[in-house]
């Protein structure tokens, strides 16, 4: 896993307020995580199985080349998690969503909100059917995981997760409802192996060679 580490509010990989989420990611990946400041080098990115893009604060932004590189990585079928936030991060959120074809439409009411329920069966939701957001942002588009679309899947193989609530993964809020289980599920999902495009066809060709099957 390659992480572009965030900044601001102590809510990103490696930050004290995210120590439990950091530990979940470390455990899920077997401590095979490298951290970079940005995603400017596509050749480095393509050496990894998955990407994690932290929020960069209200004034944070992605460069044009970073956006192109993330899009290329998504197109490879490998998994990506992109972290956004509430409306104070609107410019950042819209940049993330422009990569996957969505738009940012606002936020939930301030403070800790009522529990929300999952709307599809998925490894991220199945053992966390009810969670509690904390002033989350809302996306338009993608495949929503919960009744409030703060978490959605995108990409050619549902291989991208946008998550517009970094607080839900914060130590102080992991005790709410099933938030701890949700955080663990996200970590396991990003760490799970996915087929590299073309790998199946290469395997099939290899089986043909081994078994002596010939085309007529």
Image (cartoon, grey):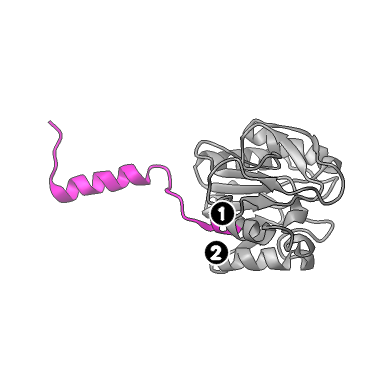
- For mark 2, give the secondary structure: helix
> Is residue 44 visible in the rendered structure shown here?
no
Residue bearing mark 1? 190
Residue bearing mark 2? 29
Residue 111 in percent (x, y) is at: 86, 50
Residue 214 quadrant: top left
The magenta stretch spans which residues?
187-216
Residue plotted at (49% across, 42% down):
77
- Tell me, yes or no, whether the highlighted magenta stretch contains residue 87: no
Residue 151 quadrant: top right
> Is residue 202 visible in the rendered structure shown here?
yes
Marks 2/1: CA–CA distance: 9 Å
Q: Is residue 152 left or right of residue 211?
A: right
The vertical placement of 185 against 73, above or below, is: below
The quarter of the rendered structure image containing the C terminus is top left
Residue 150 in percent (x, y) is at: 71, 42
Q: Is residue 30 left or right of residue 39?
A: left
Considering only order in the chain, which callout, 1 or 2, is on the residue closer to the N terminus?
A: 2
The quarter of the rendered structure image containing the N terminus is bottom right
Q: Are marks 2 and 1 in contact (CB under 8 Å)?
A: yes
**Predominant secondary structure in magenta?**
helix
């Amino acid at each position: 896993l390659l992480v572009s580490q965030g900044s601001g509010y102590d809510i990103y990989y490696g930050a004290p307020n995210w120590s439990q989420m950091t530990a979940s990611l470390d455990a899920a990946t077997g401590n095979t995580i490298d951290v970079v400041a940005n995603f400017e080098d596509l050749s480095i990115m393509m050496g990894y199985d998955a990407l994690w893009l932290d929020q960069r604060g209200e004034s944070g932004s992605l460069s044009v080349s970073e956006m192109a590189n993330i899009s290329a990585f998504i197109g490879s079928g490998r998994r990506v998690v992109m972290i956004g936030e509430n409306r104070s991060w609107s410019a950042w959120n819209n940049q993330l969503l422009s990569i996957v074809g969505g738009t940012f439409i606002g936020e939930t009411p301030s403070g800790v909100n009522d529990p929300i329920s999952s709307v599809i069966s998925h490894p991220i939701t199945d053992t966390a059917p009810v969670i509690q957001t904390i002033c989350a942002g809302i996306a338009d588009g993608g495949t929503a995981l919960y009744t409030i679309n703060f978490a959605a899947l995108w990409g050619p193989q549902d291989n991208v997760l946008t998550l517009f609530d970094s607080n839900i993964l914060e130590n102080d809020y992991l005790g709410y409802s099933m938030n701890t289980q949700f955080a663990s599920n996200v970590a396991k999902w990003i760490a799970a192996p996915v087929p590299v495009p073309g790998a199946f066809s290469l395997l099939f060709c290899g089986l043909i060679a081994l078994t002596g099957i010939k085309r007529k």
